[in-house]
Image: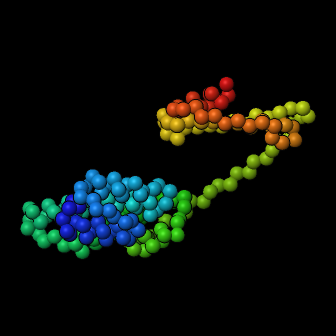
């Protein structure tokens, strides 16, 4: 799937479009991991980098089966065209992404896929409500990266005019978001 000359041409073609410099990877699993480490959910090009190795693998496998079972010739240009068509069809059903990086336009242009609009962020206004004289306000927050995962929390104490009196931050180790929120309050 990535060892033969034709397969390497296909992988290199799409790596160049997706702006990925391929190392000398000799096995399929290594190729998949390499691509998936460059994938991202927040932008369209990152999403394509995550899906691309699956689509390439499918098209290469299909072409290899046709060559072995039906005697069809292994045409690199046909495989490239099939991959582009599949990525185009998948891209039509995508929703908004969070960011569009400068180089993402080159990836979209190279694959000839439509550019998905960026999701607009909703702005919410927060107003400090003055407290009665002599009162203080405590604001705490925390979380975990993954569940369970590296967790931490912190907070800030403000006086009645909004000035910071004290703050704190603490690393809790491995935990879950609900545990972190409970520890903050206690």
Image location of residue 135, percent across then percent down: 86, 32
Return the residue nearer the eye: 150 or 184. 150
Image location of residue 95, percent across then percent down: 48, 59
**Residue at 43% in and 70% down:** 108
Q: Quadrant of the N terminus?
A: bottom left
User: Quadrant location of residue 21?
Assistant: bottom left
- 178 displayed left or right of 157: left
User: Quadrant location of residue 5?
Assistant: bottom left
Q: How many numbered circles are shown?
A: 0
- Farthest residue, direction top: 186
**Residue at 65% in and 55% down:** 122
- 39 displayed left or right of 177: left
- 135 displayed left or right of 62: right
Image location of residue 176, percent across then percent down: 53, 32
**Residue at 8% in and 65% down:** 70
Return the residue nearer the eye: 27 or 108. 27
Scheme of colours in the image: rainbow
Q: Quadrant of the C terminus?
A: top right
User: Quadrant location of residue 138?
Assistant: top right
Q: Is residue 118 visible?
A: yes
Q: Is residue 14 above or below residue 119?
A: below
**Residue at 27% in and 68% down:** 10
Q: Is residue 89 visible?
A: no
Return the residue nearer the eye: 65 or 12. 12
């Amino acid at each position: 799937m990535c060892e033969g000359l034709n397969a390497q041409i296909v992988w290199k073609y799409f790596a160049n479009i997706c702006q990925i410099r391929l190392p000398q990877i000799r096995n399929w699993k290594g190729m998949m991991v390499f691509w998936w480490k460059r994938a991202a959910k927040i932008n369209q090009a990152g999403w394509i980098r995550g899906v691309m190795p699956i689509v390439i693998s499918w098209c290469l496998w299909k072409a290899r089966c046709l060559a072995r079972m039906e005697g069809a010739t292994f045409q690199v240009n046909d495989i490239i065209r099939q991959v582009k068509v599949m990525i185009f069809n998948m891209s039509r059903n995508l929703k908004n992404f969070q960011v569009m990086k400068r180089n993402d336009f080159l990836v979209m242009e190279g694959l000839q896929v439509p550019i998905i609009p960026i999701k607009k962020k909703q702005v919410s206004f927060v107003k400090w409500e003055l407290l009665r004289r002599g009162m203080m306000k405590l604001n705490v927050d925390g979380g975990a990266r993954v569940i369970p995962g590296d967790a931490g929390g912190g907070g800030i104490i403000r006086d009645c005019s909004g000035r910071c009196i004290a703050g704190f931050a603490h690393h809790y180790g491995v935990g879950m978001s609900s545990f972190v929120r409970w520890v903050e309050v206690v």
